[in-house]
Amino acid sequence: MKNYDVVIAGAGAAGLYGAYNLSRDLKVLVIAKRELTLCNSALAQGGIAGVYNSPDDSPEFHKHDTFVAGGYENDPEATEVLVTEAQTDIGKLIELGAEFDKQADGDYHRTLEGGHGKHRIFHHADATGFEIETTLLRTVQALPNVEIWENALVCDMAKTETGFSYLVKMADGSFETVNCHFSILATGGIGRVYMYTTNSAIATGDGIAMAYRLGAEIKNLSYIQFHPTAFNNRHTRECFLISEAVRGEGAYLRNCKGERFMHLYDKRLELAPRDVVSHSIIFESKRVDSDEFFLDITHKDPDFIRGRFPMIYKNLLAQGIDMTKDYIPIFPCQHYLMGGIKVDTYARTDIENLYACGECSCTGVHGNNRLASNSLLEAHVFSRRAAGDINEKAKNAPEGFAEYEFDLHEGAPKMPEGFRRKIRKIMQEDYFVIPNVEGLGKGLEEVSEIVKTLDEGRFIIDRDYVEARSLATCAHIILKEAYAICSESADIPNMPIFDKPDEE
């Protein structure tokens, strides 16, 4: 048994920034599922959006763009918090040593991305997430009150009289039981529930599934964002993302004939929000009867491209594509989750002393479609607010720690193979960019059976079992929610708002 004031599940930007903002009087444990930089935060290319010393921009403009992208389903109070407090956290990241690109005059270079009406994205070339993640990691590793466990799998959690208990499987295969008064779930998204995703290997929805089993409210889990420009090599399930910023710098979308086509669907052309562009690609694929699509930035200066997108350039070159000369094969794939564990503006769930931050949470700021580069901002703003709330509550925390005894499934058989493949296939076929309304019911039935088998069955507690159970739980919630929406109306869920071109 190990006891801490606060346990944070997840070592991405939300988890680390939450740890940084906790009082130095609190004993804190951060649990990283895999190696410390393997997380979606580290993969974020575009940047962090926000108004910081920006005379031609304002939080009101930022809020307007966020609402438009989110189909006006955004939570007004949470969105106001997001855009007005952006300057606090961007300033703090700069103070901690995060290096954002600057112009020749010394001012920060702010780039433009789809859905933004102003240049407000702070970036470190095209590897902003990695810069922020490593900056926070250096900072938190130096804190004397914070312990970090690497390659530690959170298998389950339970509510106790004094807080929470976690069952953690360590790198050597042993189990540890960890108790705490306060818990922050910062476990990331659900990308691995799909056959193709831009997400890292850790994105299996573990935190969402555990919170659901504890009885926390899960909201809008069917609000899934499919990024329109994932690299399409037709071979790997983890798709390399071609950043929104490439279109922000003037890249064109082209179909199999080499023709631009966005003018057929939206006045904003390539700078329409992500869901609009993804839907447009699917519509265009049906019109031209092909799924071959390309991103073209060859009309820009080669030196500019190599300097602005060094990581993308290098990764594409390894695939035999020179983006200064060649079209980049792209197609939509799963990228982000707007829903999750429902929280308030202090990241509090409806379970006392349980908080959720980052992609696993549903603050409501994204509506039904996240505006580009708002995710890193959300992770920082609300994890800081969660830490501040915990700092106050911790003054009256219980003295001791209640213990919980987990069933370790000793002597149990290994989980049968095939569950994860079946879940991915169902999700890819029935709930991709435009949902397969006719297939949702059958898919839901099949996933429900998998959930029942994994919940009621007794299998060895290993990574395969824990992740398959999480993926099945999340897929079940997503399909159940989507099926209910489709059953109640003729509308297909999550259809974007198009700014349609004038009819000729």
Image: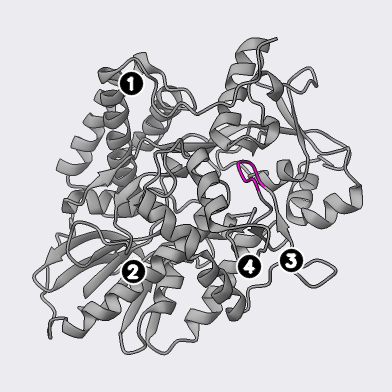
Q: Which residues are magenta?
A: 113-117
The residue indicated by pointer 2 is: 386
Please identify the quarter of the rendering in which residue 419 is found: top left
Quarter of the image with the C terminus in it: top right
Q: CA distance from mark 2 to mark 1?
A: 36 Å
Image disc number at residue 295 = none
The residue indicated by pointer 3 is: 101
Disc 2 residue crowd, few under 14, some 14–19, many 20+, Cα 10 Å: many
Mark 4 or mark 1: which comes first in sequence? 4
Secondary structure of the residue carrying numbered label 2: helix
Disc 4 residue crowd, few under 14, some 14–19, many 20+, Cα 10 Å: many
Relative depth, front residue between 386 and 192? 386
Mark 2 or mark 1: which comes first in sequence? 2
Q: Is residue 284 above or below residue 72?
A: above
The residue indicated by pointer 1 is: 440
Secondary structure of the residue carrying numbered label 1: helix
